[in-house]
Image (tube, rainbow, N blue to C red):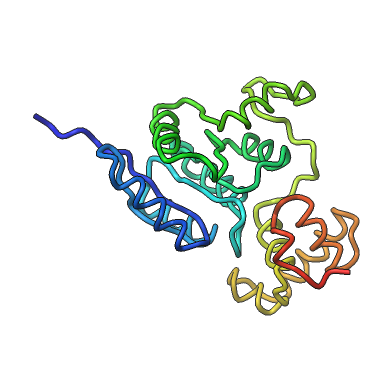
Amino acid sequence: MKPEKKITVLLADDHQIFREGLRMLLDVESDIEIVGEASTGRQAMALAKKLNPSVIVMDIAMPLLNGIEAARQILASFPETKVLILSAHSDDAYIEKAIAIGASGFLIKQTSAHVLSDAIREIEKGSTFFSPSVAQRLHQHHKTVLDRNGRLKETRIHLTPREMEILQLIAEGEANKQVAAELEISIKTVEKHRDHLMKKLNIHDTAGLTRYAIEEGIIESSVQLTII
């Protein structure tokens, strides 16, 4: 008898102890196989390309590239991959963004182990899966505007993937030289992107960009503690 094909899963979370806990919980499931772990959004993108997992369990708050932007870029390149957001953050803005970029589910980190494994199975089959509290809020959120595909229409200023990357790195306190090295582009290119970001957002200093990144959930407020 041919063995049942396992659901391959990539875990993306910047806390190693949490990833290890997830691995222990999911390793007991006979139909689920953990094929890789990522601690940053950028690493998740590289491993998604290398491993081609069926499902990515993705945290939102990660360094270098947050989970929402990493998921958006992964899904743009690998639309067959399913993304399940697993986050401590359950604000409406995070949930709306996750749906808007095509995530198949959203679970809060207080979720029990069996719910997580059930969610992985459901979204791998093409369904959606949300924590009960999240599903209730989505149902009651009558002002949400959906497009013909059932996804949220974009209402915020649109930033390109590169602009999102540079914005996060700037908000995390990286200097232009460090941003250039991280993205493997010239300092002059970073400066051009930075100027364009400020004009597009009508923000005129680094502190303002950082506040915007926090308000939009691109970084956590704990990343920058010295903003006035």
Task: Locate the N terminus by quadrant.
Answer: top left
Give the left or right position of residue 157, taking residue 55 as reference: right
Quadrant in the picture for residue 141: top right
Count of marks placed on residues: 0
Residue under the point 48% across and 56% down: 44
Coordinates of residue 66 in the picture (x, y in percent): 61, 55
Residue 225 higher or lower than 109, as above or below? below
Asked where in the image residue 150 lies, by quadrant, the reply is top right
Name the residue rendered at 62%, 31% in the picture.
Answer: 133
Residue 117: x and y, percent? 39, 37
Could you tell me which residue is drawn at 72 percent across and 22 percent down? Answer: 140
What's the residue at 89%, 69% (across, down)? 228
Seen from the viewer's position, the closer of residues 224 and 191 is 224
Lateral position of residue 180 relative to residue 204, left or right: left
Q: Is residue 12 above or below residue 33?
A: below
Please state which of residues 50 and 196 is positioned toward the viewer in this rendering: 50
Rendering coords of residue 58 (x, y %): 51, 48
Q: Residue furthest left?
A: 1
Of 170 and 6, nearer the camera is 6
* 190 relative to 58 in the view: left or right: right
Question: Which x, y percent locates residue 43?
Answer: 48, 61
